[in-house]
Structure formats: structure tokens, C-alpha cells
Image (spheres, rainbow, N blue to C red):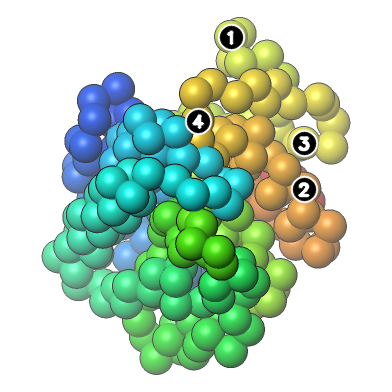
Amino acid sequence: MIIIKLGGSIITNKQKPLTAKPKIINTIVEKLKTVDEQYIIIHGGGSFGHYWSVKYNMHTEAKNYDKRGISVVKNSMIELNKIVLDVFYKNDLFPYVFPASNFIDIDGKPIQKKIIEMKEITEAGLIPITYGDVLWYIDKKSYILSGDKIMTILAKLLKPRLCIFVLNENGIYSDFNKKKLIYNLDDAKPDVKIINDATGGIKRKYEEAKLIKELKLKVFFTNGNKPSRIIDAINDVRFEGTTFE
């Protein structure tokens, strides 16, 4: 079992609202066709969900957010998810959409039997695809559940062989401006500044990766613009990226 998180920055153009990058998505999916192992896909919101969550000041904390914001974030994520699903299907892979509301209950807790169901779906030859989303909460509140957080939620129960964060960068840097790549996160202090990201940006990814590592699981960060690196990580071949294990 492998869990792959396609970051919003790699599948959308974050500089242009509501703009997907279907060519990049397709290139990644073409490479995933060569993977002879069960896997689950999570994707971020990028210029779809994140764009609207920033516009309506929505975050991971449960609050009484603007109803228009709740609606438009949810609708935009469905729109982006449909783009991702279509690319998988056109490549003769069989996606099975599994929204976060399927496996997270109203008080924000994971529903164990539904997460196990995702594993059963992979065993049937389908690919569960879920995504970061706005979820309903008790007391008429709502919150943003990030795809990065979903990675940890699934990893805790499914114990995957490998968790891969696919970024728009080569990995995690010790100095972002100088692009000094950390090859092993145990060896250096990461530069994880937050830059206008409703769900925490690279800092959130790093924090979730630490939690996954504590489960004795392996985490990789790599560049989705170079999809062969994803395959190298899966095949345990030396690759350009960051390892956390």
C-alpha cells in the first residue's frame, strides 16, 4: 500500500485562480500506470479550494464561516476532483472518488471502518481518490481539512509502505531562497515558512510528515514536474528529493 498526495501547487496554477494543469496531471498519471502496487491518491486544492478559502478567510479551525465561502470552496473542489478523475480514467485506470466526508464524522474524528473500506477498494483494482475539503462540524460550524492532514489520518490506520508528498519543488529546503535541498530530514533544519496558505503550506506538510515518521513509516517529498522521481521513490531507487524515515 502506498499513499500519494498530489499537492495543489503541482496540479493547478496557483498564480491563476481556478486553473488546473491537466498536462502535468496526465504526465504523472502516465507514470503511475507502471506501478504494480495498490495505492491511494489524495490531492490538494491549489488555485481552486485554496483560492476561495483565502478569499473567505477560512482555515483549519472550526468556526461559523461565511455560507457562500463554504459552498464555493466545496463546489470548486468537486470541479478540480472531476478533472483529476477524468485524467485517470482516460489513462485506462479506474478511479473511485472517496470524499473526506465519507470517512470523517461530524466531530472531526476518523471513521475506521470507512478507511478500511478504502483498502478493500484498492484490492478490487480501483484507485480511491480523495481530497482536501471543507467539512461540516458540530454547532453549525465548518473547517478546512487539508489533504496533508488526510495523509496522516490514512497512514495511522492503513500503515502504508510509503507516503509520498508530490510538490512543485524538489523537496524540503534548508534555505528556500537558495534552494538548498535536504536529502534526509533527520540531518538538517527545514525552512518551512508559511506563505499565504489557508492550510499551512510546507509547514503543515513537514508537521504531518513528522507524525507519520513517528508511526515508523517512510515519507518522501519529491517534484511532480519530474514524475519519474515518484516512480524511483516507489521502486526504492535513488532519487532527487527529501526522505524522512
Q: State the CA–CA distance, disc 3 to disc 2.
A: 10 Å
| Local secondary structure at mark 3 | helix
Q: Residue 11: x, y in percent?
A: 32, 42
Identify the disc placed on residue 199: none
Residue type at numbered disc 1: Asn
Residue 197 image label:
4
Which marked residue is nearer to the observer: mark 3 or mark 4?
A: 4
Q: Amino acid at mark 3?
A: Leu
SS for callout 4: loop
Residue assigned mark 2: 210
The quarter holding residue 239 reads top right
Q: What's the CA distance linking mark 1 and mark 3? A: 18 Å
Mark 1 = which residue?
177
Who comes first in sequence, dot 3 or dot 4?
A: 3
Which quadrant would residue 244 be assigned to in this image? top right
Who's the residue at 44% across and 77% down the image? Answer: 102
**Location of residue 59 in the rendering, given as x and y in whole percent from the top left corner:** 52, 41
Q: Which mark identifies residue 185?
A: 3
Indicate which disc, 3 or 2, sits on the residue closer to the N terminus. 3
Mark 2 lies on a secondary structure that is helix
Q: Is residue 224 above or below residue 209?
A: above
> Do residues under tags 1 and 3 come within 8 Å of each other at their CB atoms?
no
The answer to whether residue 167 is visible is: no
Residue shown at 39% from the left, 91% from the top:
124
Depth check: give the residue in front, 224 or 18. Answer: 18
| Foreground of the two, 172 or 103 | 103
Give how far apart the Cα atoms at labels 4 and 1 are. 18 Å
Name above or below for residue 228 compared with residue 99: above
The residue lying toward the viewer, choosing from 226 and 159, is 159
Residue drawn at x 40%, y 39% is: 53
Per the model, the C-alpha gap separating discs 3 and 4 is 22 Å
